[in-house]
Image: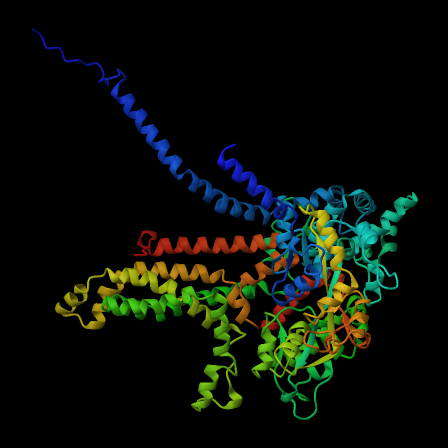
Amino acid sequence: MEVTISTAELLTTDGIPLKQSLRKAERRNKLRAFLLVFPLLLFIFVTFVMPIGDMLLRSVDDSQINSVFPNTFDEYKNWDKGADELPPEEVYKSLFFELANGDKRQIGKALTRMNYAKSGWKSLIKKTTREIKKIVKKGEEPVSYKDTFIKINKLWADPTYWYSFNQMVNDRSSIYYWNAIDRTFDENGDVAMQDEKRRMYMNTWLRTFKVSIYVTIFCLILGFPVAHLLANLPLRYSNLLMIFVLLPFWTSLLVRTTAWIVMLQQNGVINGILVWLGIISDDGRIQMVYNETGTLIAMTQILLPFMILPLYSVMRVIPKSHMRAAQNLGAKPATAFWRVYLPQTIPGISAGGLLVFVLAIGYFITPELVGGKDGKLIGSWIAYHLKTTLNWGLCAALGAILLGIMLIFYWLYNKIVGIDNIKLG
Amino acid sequence: MSKFTKAFLFASIIFAPFAANAVTVASWGGAYTESQQKAYADTYSDPGSIVFENYNGGLGEVRAQVESGSVTWDLVDVLPSDAITGCDEGLFEDISSEIASMGVPGPNGESIAEDMENNGLEYHSGWDCCVPQIFWTYVVFYDPDAFPGEKPDSMADFFDTEKFPGKRGIHTWATGIIEKAMVADGVKPTAVPTVLANQTGAIDRAFEVMDRIKDDVVFWSAGSQPLELVKSGEVVMAVAYNGRVGAANLAEGENFEYIWEGQVLDQEYLCLTAGAPNRDAALDFMMHASTPEAQAEQAKYITYGPMRASGIPIIQNNEPWGPGGVDIMPHMPNTPDRLKVSIVSDPQWWSDYGAEINERYAAWMAN
């Protein structure tokens, strides 16, 4: 008798090939796993990807105003600024009809936008529109549209108003990014410096970096010994100390900030003690709040736990025997710390440093309250434009720059230390 | 019917009226909203139908609500420049005809608009969408104990640290302080808006005046801070919202003095959001909240002045108007005498130039 070894596929009991059946089961499992994470994906998409995408779009979008004044802008581009001081008649004529026939609300939105390009547009357009509507109502047709405009308001003969059109004539525009770093477009549409008196964004950016970097360094200097102490004390003491670290977490941010004002002001606790000790004279009280110093001190204290906690969780798992072994092998305590202990805390330092820096660079409430004269950061300006001027394009550009900077720092960090070196415990 | 359906129906009957009729008013919170609750909502025919919600000012949220089509605020309490922008952009509904027909006239038959004009105001497009509330002001105040001898009583004194040594508290944005500096420079208070609008270089002059005190300034950013600054002796004089100073004097037993000269009056409006879910009920409440009586009533609880001129005599003739039998008139910013030495801030001008000047102000502060 011959034994035949079946070369046919293995079948399951219901006659379906095993491979196929397995694949099916696997697919079902994958689908189930996907369905389980789907709500989370959706959540991330709706709350994270979409807003950031929307922000990036807004930072370059100027389509609203272009839908209100399409003809005027087209004609404007034909203006030869070398030849004529003022735009040609066609520009005035198009603007006349676009103001006369345009939707009131759309024009309203457009003139909010125009006012970012040059202060004064709002009133000028509103007054002019009222007069134009009267002319149209009477049924008169102006002989010269240019003269009609200038008769309504002499500002229409001021070329600087017309030059500001350069900032708005394109559907997609980089102007908000330039505005965010104190630059604007000149009469030829080239990038130029903003009026000297109102240049403040570059300074604010630099200050934001400076403060964020200082706060990160101060947090590290202050947090490292504390974390070390916490990690090496017996549990019942370290738990008690931990509460002191965590307590500020449970206190309102506003309360902590206000408390710092009480401590730091010229008639405050610290100045009082210094005068009492005779270190400074009564007239020489130090201004420590309502300026950059105040921002630095208050932010360092508020962000300190974000440095201590990652450091602590990394330090806790470093065996104490390492330091002893190093010293046994002849290292001085300093060398042992420097060559054996410190390298093992790098993941904690990285995590804490990045966390504190990221939080600091976008900080708003504390600098706003204690910043006073020169301690406000870029976040305050984002809030100002979001609420007060409604210049969301500029807000978006400021936000996008902030995001870009974060990504650069992240990339640099990854290059230098390696992102897999980050540890929260 | 299942138990669940019954319960559901029952619940909807109970809760539906609240959900459907509650008019949501977004306002600034704190003592201010409390005074609105007492003066406007509690005196309304259906007090339960008015719900106040806090916000931080500005049109950011309103624009987000209107643009996304999910409007939850029926009424918003705004500054005049926001009333103008919101009305121009269509974030607030144009109800000029409703205000004209439904607005409650004053004792001599004056319309809401006429009543405001009697208070020194000029028409702006915010009047098409909003009804007036109160005047609040940026006023300079001090603790008399800090000046044993001569006491400061003018803007020139505020900007003169040689005559009156000591630090000054001012806010971290430009509105109000620019106008005060113009007065210190010799401009007649009532003429300040015209000078700012028509004279090139007026702003430069204001900044030059502000330079005089710059090294002696403590900059504040929250309304409670100037009170703290003066109380603790950190500064000898400060600019503050007059309602805060009034509250300190009336409720906390302080004895602060005002310098009414050069005070900068700003307006406050109640506006109807475009697409408000309870439009008609909200409109009805607006008309109630803009009567001279209701506005005078509000002065009982916070020392802000009625924007309708006919509200003032109601307070004057019924003193002591305040709670506990105190006179309110000494704390009212817009009495005829005080209006003569005051600046009524020009919201249209600020909405034209505000962003630019605030950037310049920030650059000035930090350098």
Among all residues in the image, which is located at the extreme bottom? Answer: B149
Residue A164 visible (yes or no): no
**Quadrant of residue B173 within the rendered picture:** bottom right
Residue for point 34% across, 28% down:
A27
Q: Position of residue A403 (x, y in %)?
A: 49, 53
Residue B287 or B116: which is nearer the viewer?
Answer: B287
What's the image's color scheme?
rainbow
Tell me if A414 is positioned left or right of A78 in this view.
Answer: left
B72 to A253, vertically: above or below: above
Q: Is residue B119 above or below residue B258?
A: above
Query: Residue at the spot x=36%, y=33% of the render?
Result: A32
Is residue A146 placed above or below B201 in the rendered structure?
above
Quadrant of the snapshot with the N terminus of chain A: top left
Q: Is residue B110 in view from this perspective? A: yes
Side (left or right) of B162 relative to B261: left
Looking at the picture, tell me which residue is in the foreground, B250 or A175. B250
Q: Left of B224 or right of it: where is A346?
A: left
Where is the C terminus of chain A found, in terms of image quarters? Answer: bottom left
**Image label count:** 0
Q: Is residue A355 left or right of residue A140?
A: left
Q: Position of residue A89 (x, y in %)?
A: 83, 46
Q: Position of residue A286 (x, y in %)?
A: 50, 83
- Using the image, determine if residue A239 lies above or below residue B258: above
Percent position (x, y) of residue A144? 89, 47
Residue furthest to the left in view is A1
Front position in the image: A259 or A154: A259
Q: Which residue ends up furthest to the top in the rendered image?
A: A1
What residue lies at 13% left-to-right and 10% top-to-bottom?
A: A4
